[in-house]
Image (cartoon, rainbow, N blue to C red):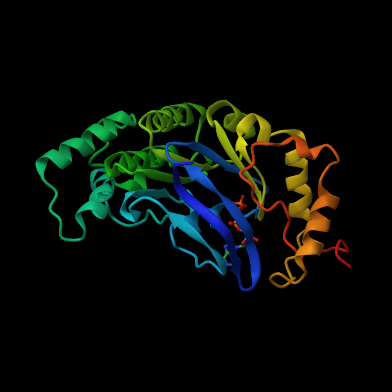
Amino acid sequence: MDAAISLDNLTVSYRRHPALHHVNGSFARGSLTAIVGPNGAGKSTLLKSMLGLVPCNDGRVHTHVDARRIAYLPQQAEIDRSFPINVLDCVLLGYWQAKGNWGGIDAAMRARAIQALAAVGLDGFAGRAVSSLSVGQFQRVLFARILLQDAEVILLDEPFNAIDARTTGDLLRIISAWHAERRTVIAVLHDHDQVRRAFPQTLLLARNVVAWGETAEVMCEDNLQRARAMAEAVDEHAGVCAVSEAEVLALSGALRPAHEHSHSHSHGQAQHPHPAVAKGGLQ
Ligand SMILES: Nc1ncnc2c1ncn2[C@@H]1O[C@H](COP(=O)(O)OP(=O)(O)OP(=O)(O)O)[C@@H](O)[C@H]1O
């Protein structure tokens, strides 16, 4: 596979509690992938680890594209938009990675930013303060900013959270266009119907990889149930890798439904849940 980003035994912990545990697999160049999983499954952490925003405890992220050509849209809750900046300047920040702090913004770049605003349905918004926008309008601004970045890999964290159906539809069309342009798009999402409709590939996470591959196969009820069981079984107070690999594999088998082995499109990830899953499971 021609991979854009590969994960090699990736383990990330916060204060020794694993948020991701021995994750293996690759995002193919030009693929459009949804990352789904229960709350706390490690989805946002995975995006951040791919950007180098959180350190790996074990394993590695291999980025096969220029890091400057990765665009990232964090959850809106993580963005402070009280700063005094207008919509056009916010969109122009999309040039920052290419131009650096001292790169000049010329007339052609401004014209492209205005075009990007029109493409996201915000004609006439250039002079508005970002603090005055609705949540949906601000999300459109952030998509316009990504349009200017000309990124090879685009990471989106819950891009449709609190966004209405019309705006979601418009932004999904932009994502489809990125996919048609062979950009690699990876989005954390919670709406399973939307994932089934618009995302050909899915990674189902519950700290470990539950399944990864064609969406129709990954999003079967068995896998979703297994992800829920794995998330519920995690003991937040257990240490990192507190049990042996054999115990991990045994528990993984215990959590797996008998007919689970039919999911053939996974990329060969370790299928074990977090080893310190507990609540009696490993005693
Ligand atoms: N900065 C942090 N410090 C400590 N623990 C953290 C931090 N960020 C995340 N965690 C923990 O890591 C685990 C995974 O969090 P993460 O935000 O990656 O999950 P998620 O799948 O994106 O969840 P959600 O669907 O609720 O957004 C959770 O148990 C969370 O409490």
**Quarter occupied by residue 113:** top left
Q: Nearer the viewer, residue 71 or 253?
A: 253
The percent position of residue 62, horizontal first and vertical second, equals 46, 56
Q: Is residue 208 above or below residue 108?
A: below
Ligand 1 in which quarter: bottom right
Which residue sits at x=75%, y=35%?
262
Q: Quadrant of the C terminus?
A: bottom right
Residue extending furthest front?
1
In the rendered image, is residue 277 in sight?
no
Q: Is residue 124 left or right of residue 217?
A: left
The percent position of residue 264, horizontal first and vertical second, equals 68, 36
In the rendered image, is residue 258 in sight?
yes
Which residue sits at x=42%, y=33%?
175
Q: Is residue 79 left or right of residue 269?
A: left
Q: Is residue 72 above or below residue 181?
A: below
Which residue sits at x=59%, y=38%?
202
The percent position of residue 36, horizontal first and vertical second, equals 61, 43
Residue extending furthest left?
107
Q: Is residue 87 above or below residue 174?
A: below
Which residue sits at x=77%, y=39%?
261
Q: How many marks?
A: 0
Q: Is residue 64 left or right of residue 35?
A: left
Q: Nearer the viewer, residue 141 or 242?
A: 242
